[in-house]
Image (spheres, helix red, strand yellow):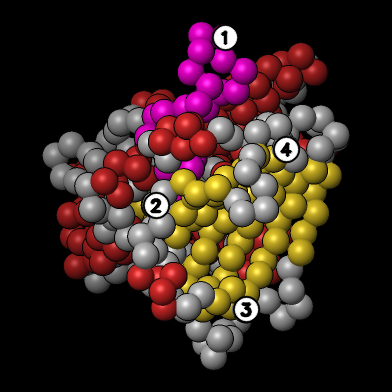
Amino acid sequence: ELRTPLNSILGLSEALQDEVFGPLTQSQLKYLKTIERSGTHLLDLINDILDVAKIEAGQFEIDVSATDIASLCESSLTLVQQQAIKKHISLTTAIPPLAPTLSIDGRRILQSLVNLLNNAVKFTPEGGSVALEVSYRQQNQTETAVDTQTIFESDQNPKKWGWKSGPLRAKNYIQLSVTDTGIGIAPEHITKLFKPFSQIDSTLNRKYMGTGLGLVLVKQMAELHGGTVSLTSEVGVGSCFCINLPYEPDVSQIEADPLSDEINSPSLPAPPDESPLILLAEDNEDTISLMVSYLETVGYRLMVANDGLETLKLAQSHHPDLILMDIQMPELDGIESMQRLRQSPQLRQVPIIALTALAMAGDKERCLEAGANEYLSKPVKLKQLVRSIQTLLGQ
């Protein structure tokens, strides 16, 4: 329910900016970018809320794969670079050569790093600096046995203090640290930092916007990996947030690149008589209007089914080249519709892309098991959808 309206908002703003419905003035393009930017921000907030809800309900599972730490760190810096340039903040890195490959959920640790970097840039005055460092660490058994979820003062500087989220059970760990020259954090505010929907800046004339979920997710993601987060800070001088992840030095180095997500532009449309026929199974009128208009503009023929039973009838009678299947539909849902389609010898090989606002644990697996070739959660990037269609049709 939260994602589906955004599918139309973001999809239509993307399609309009691509001028698929006709040319636009510069002012119109400017306002469309504002709509897209605000919609994307809203989507980020919704995703954070859903992640916290899933973790608290015990329904969140990390998707572990071999991840190159150096590539992950470079990607995180790229995502905050423009924000830093606007404030004239220098971004620096210290990544050791031959940084290891870790078995982690690369997308979630990337999300955590971007959260920390965004905060560092947000709370650092113009002309300051933010540094991202990767380092190998070791601790002895006495350290791992002690619960360190307490505030402690620095031995060298009484104005500087530290905090750890809990005991780290691993002897060897990789530390990803984000250090800034920002406003710093007072010790009495630590209880608010990692509490959902809580912010230090709670006055009516708030200077810094946000939901207060970013650091909650950083802590929870680290703990789901068997790691911890730690923090040192000095008011008016700056802060250093660390993600500590267990690391086995002899782990086999497997090539992986979980961060590649470039979207190619659609190819030129094929002549109408040769255009592939796509069956869109969807009951939301706004989504239908968006999908049909965009996909026809880039060169496909479309037919629409408003429920699962109609989808089966049209598929049997018209033999489409590809089916876009919504999951939550009346009469017959998308899961059962796909299962029945796969039982038909004539339709068994027709590519199916599941397009759904369902994004909870196990939803993707359910769609693939039912017969989908690919799963895309709403709101869907139109260029990404076209790329998936091109791949499945061998274009």
- Disc 4 versus disc 2: distance between alpha carbons? 23 Å
Q: Which residue is mark 4?
A: 237
- Quadrant containing the N terminus is top left
Instruction: Out of 72 and 352, give the one closest to the viewer.
Output: 72
Q: Do residues under tags 1 and 3 come within 8 Å of each other at their CB atoms?
A: no
Determine the residue positioned at 56% across, 33% down: 186
Camera-near label (2 vs 3) is 2
Residue 58, above or below 344: above
Please name the amino acid that badge 4 sits on. Val
- Which span is picked out in magenta? 196-219
* Label 4 CA crowd tier, 10 Å (few <14, some 14–19, many 20+): some
Determine the residue positioned at 52% across, 87% down: 251
Tell me if 192 is positioned left or right of 29 in this view.
left
* Residue 177 seen: yes
Q: Secondary structure at mark 2?
A: loop
Q: Secondary structure at mark 3?
A: loop
Q: Which residue is mark 3?
A: 100
Q: Which residue is mark 2?
A: 149
Where in the figure is residue 228, as x and y percent of width and height? Answer: 45, 60
Determine the residue positioned at 41% across, 49% down: 150
- Disc 3 versus disc 4: distance between alpha carbons? 32 Å
**Which mark is first along the chain, 1 or 4?**
1
**Which mark is first along the chain, 1 or 2?**
2
* Residue 287 seen: no
- Disc 2 versus disc 3: distance between alpha carbons? 28 Å
Camera-near label (2 vs 1) is 2
**Which mark is first along the chain, 3 or 1?**
3
Where in the figure is residue 346, as x and y percent of width and height? Answer: 28, 67
Where in the figure is residue 217, as x and y percent of width and height? Answer: 43, 46
